[in-house]
Amino acid sequence: MQANIFAHRGASKYAPENTMASFSLAHQQGADGIETDVHLTKDHIPVLMHDERVNRTTNSSGYIKDYTFEQLRQLDAGAWFSPEFAGSRILSLEECLEWTQDKSLYLNIELKNNKIDYKHLETIVYDKLSRYHLLHRTILSTFNPISVKRLKHLNQNIGVALLTSKRSRNLVSAAKDLGANAIHIKYRLLDHLLVDQSHQENMAIRAYTVNRPRQMLRALSIGCDGVFADVPEMAVHYRDQF
Ligand code: G3P
Ligand code: CA
């Protein structure tokens, strides 16, 4: 099967990450899917941002969990990247799902619950995906192993990936024991053996973040099932040539 290209936080090399500009550009560049990160606001609205705090990617400071959605909406999520994107807004998960609905795109929604274990995050995200009929083309992922279990408990049939930046000897069996369908691993930890072990256990394996042609070609040649790229057009180009 062809490897899938997920735009990492959208086409985040060219537009501010996790904004509509970044997602639209990823779609234009031919990405198969969008990768995004979700946190909960003070009023329990799932929003798309990478960090726990707003400091790096907005004109304000503090934790997402201490802002209401309406407060977050007042922030500028684009000017930090370039003046061209000033006025970009933080998106709710719901806005992204609405945008995705009529497009032929996969979603990889990363639950950012490894540092702050947001209460009910799994259920809130699951219910939204269910309401938008997008469960069948979504992979939920998390660095939090307990959250993998909670997700599979909600629905055995949803696609869930265990994220990891470490490579332990029993990684594949540990992921399998949690019920994960896939492993999403840091690119530099990826090799042929791990790909084969994952496939033997009927698990997909995808690598983040692949931004160089040499990395892309290597990932393809060892049978990686997908990559996360800040530059989706490059990854799509090499995948299509392969
Ligand atoms: O989902 C792959 C990748 O996004 C995980 O790392 O830190 O970029 O969210 P991070
Ligand atoms: Ca992520």
Image: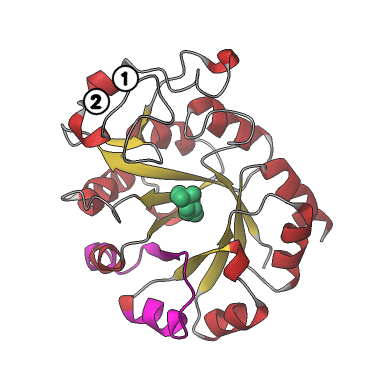
58 left or right, relative to 236:
left
Residue 132, visible in the rendered structure? no
Q: Nearer the viewer, residue 28 or 207?
A: 207
Give the percent coordinates (x, y) of residue 85.
55, 17
Disc marking residue 69? 2
Identify the element where label 1 is drawn.
helix
Amino acid type of the residue tagged 1 in the rendering: Arg
The answer to if 51 sits in the magenta stretch is no
Identify the element where label 2 is drawn.
helix
The residue that mark 1 highlights is 73
x 69%, y 65%: residue: 219
**Is residue 87 placed above or below 77 in the rendered structure?**
above
**Is residue 52 placed above or below 70 in the rendered structure?**
below
Q: Nearer the viewer, residue 203 or 207?
A: 207
x 47%, y 85%: residue: 169
Q: Which residues are magenta?
A: 151-177
x 55%, y 84%: residue: 197
Give the percent coordinates (x, y) of residue 83.
57, 13
Give the percent coordinates (x, y) of residue 155.
27, 64
x 33%, y 49%: residue: 112
Residue 223, visible in the rendered structure? yes
Position of the C terminus, as image quadrant, is bottom right
**Is residue 59 placed above or below 216 in the rendered structure?**
above
